[in-house]
Image: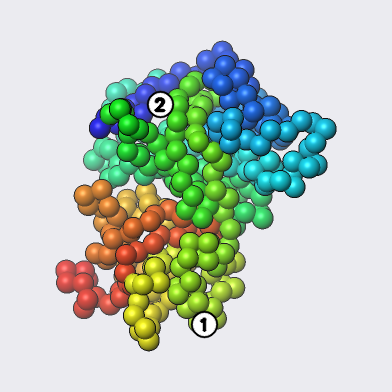
């Protein structure tokens, strides 16, 4: 399986001007419905009048956008929140700061952070996960801390049938996965990547756990009196588990599964640490064989974004006491 998107995208981003505006480029590549509705939101369109060239637009295919005329705008907004400015802003990511206009060398193409890859002294990142900052700032959906926009996480997915070229999968709100279907295509301010739908919108922790069916962990949070704290505190990282990961009357410590004041998306977990749980126990995250492990326990579903942070689902209950994990101090 070839993974050539990184070099392709970084090479494209090294050129500061492309000579084609976003709307024209979207229409040229067939994203006519998204292009039409995006123009309804002047605040978002203003983002593309700057000289920065680090903005990636994840353009949904036409059938993923609810058709609507200007005369039926009110009706449209009652049909789907995908038609709101908040949802459109989630489809646009950036690196946080405009990149340098100096063309990178081959070495810098590997190590620079133009697409959000965490820099590592050894060169390539430890995994293919990438945390992407979006333009979503609506407090209905985002509570990550002062001036912190919503995030999604990208990773390489298996190639489509008949191809050996890896594509990108995006994990958004509620763990919904959106897949690359075309691109990247260049335009004045960065890249357009075609995707099969809109990203999932983030919701509070307990709502997210309910939608995922992780009701045992949710009920434990409520029983411990931690619902308000974990729903409302900015920058939370949660390690949840499936209902069948715990037996009958067995108990667990919710605080051993939570970290306050950490936006622990996969790239940030793998490249930093160790961390301290809210119970005061040590959390060590490792990457091996394509999987991420938390004190030796595999994450089976990662980067489920929520309103105030991120949830990772473990394959079993985490007992963070060091005596259970030889070799971890």
Looking at the picture, tell me which residue is in the foreground, 39 or 120: 39
Q: Picture coordinates of residue 111 (x, y %)?
A: 32, 34
Instruction: Give the numbered dot on residue 117.
Output: none
Q: Earlier in the sequence, mark 2 or mark 1?
A: 2
User: From the viewer's perspective, is residue 68 above or below residue 227?
Assistant: above
Residue 184, placed above or below residue 310: above
The C terminus is located in which quarter? bottom left
For the question of whether residue 153 can be seen, the reply is yes
Question: Which residue lies at the image location 44% right of the left edge and 65% below the top edge?
Answer: 238
Give the mark toward the camera: 2 or 1: 1
Task: Give residue 9's mark.
Answer: 2
Q: Position of residue 150 (x, y in %)?
A: 56, 48
Q: Is residue 68 left or right of residue 120?
A: right
Q: Name the secondary structure under disc 1.
A: helix
Where residue 76 sits: x, y (%)? Answer: 74, 41
State whether residue 13 is above or below residue 196: above
Q: Residue furthest right?
A: 71
The alpha-carbon separation of the residues under discs 2 and 1 comes to 47 Å
Look at 21% across and 72% down and name the residue there.
325
Toward which corner of the image does residue 166 lie, by quadrant? top left
Q: Secondary structure at mark 2?
A: helix
Q: Quadrant of residue 273?
A: bottom left
Answer few, some or many: residues within 10 Å of disc 1's Cα (few below 14, many 20 plus, some between 14 and 19).
few
**Vertical side of 161 occupied by 274: above or below:** below
> Dot 2, crowdedness within 10 Å: few (<14), some or many (≥20)?
some
Q: Residue furthest top?
A: 19
Residue drawn at the location 36% of the way across and 72% of the way down: 244
Residue highlighted by disc 1: 223
Determine contact: label 2, label 1, CB under 8 Å: no
Please tell me which residue is depicted at 63% across the width and 39% down the height of the picture: 88
- What count of labels does the image hold? 2
Whether residue 286 sits left or right of residue 225 in the image: it is left
């Amino acid at each position: 399986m070839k993974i050539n998107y990184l070099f392709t995208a970084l090479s494209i981003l090294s050129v500061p001007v492309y000579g084609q505006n976003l709307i024209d480029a979207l229409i040229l590549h067939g994203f006519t419905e998204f292009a039409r509705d995006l123009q309804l939101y002047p605040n978002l369109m203003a983002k593309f009048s700057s000289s920065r060239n680090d903005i990636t637009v994840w353009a949904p295919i036409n059938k993923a956008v609810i058709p609507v005329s200007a005369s039926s705008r009110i009706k449209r907004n009652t049909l789907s929140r995908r038609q709101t400015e908040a949802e459109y802003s989630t489809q646009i990511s950036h690196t946080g700061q405009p990149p340098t206009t100096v063309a990178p060398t081959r070495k810098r193409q590997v190590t620079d952070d133009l697409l959000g890859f965490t820099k590592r002294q050894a060169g390539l990142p430890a995994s293919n996960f990438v945390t992407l900052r979006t333009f979503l700032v609506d407090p209905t959906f985002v509570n990550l801390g002062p001036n912190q926009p919503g995030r999604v996480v990208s990773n390489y997915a298996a190639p489509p049938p008949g191809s050996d070229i890896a594509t990108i999968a995006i994990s958004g709100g509620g763990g919904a996965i959106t897949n690359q279907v075309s691109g990247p295509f260049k335009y004045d301010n960065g890249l357009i990547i075609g995707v099969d739908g809109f990203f999932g919108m983030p919701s509070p922790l307990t709502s997210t756990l309910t939608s995922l069916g992780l009701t045992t962990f949710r009920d434990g949070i409520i029983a411990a009196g931690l619902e308000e704290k974990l729903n409302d505190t900015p920058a939370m990282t949660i390690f949840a588990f499936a209902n069948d990961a715990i037996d009958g009357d067995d108990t667990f410590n919710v605080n051993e599964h939570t970290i306050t004041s950490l936006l622990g998306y996969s790239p940030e977990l793998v490249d930093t640490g160790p961390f301290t749980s809210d119970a005061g126990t040590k959390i060590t995250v490792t990457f091996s064989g394509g999987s991420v492990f938390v004190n030796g326990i595999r994450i089976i579903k990662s980067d489920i974004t929520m309103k105030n942070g991120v949830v990772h689902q473990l394959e079993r209950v985490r007992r963070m006491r060091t005596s259970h994990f030889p070799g971890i101090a």
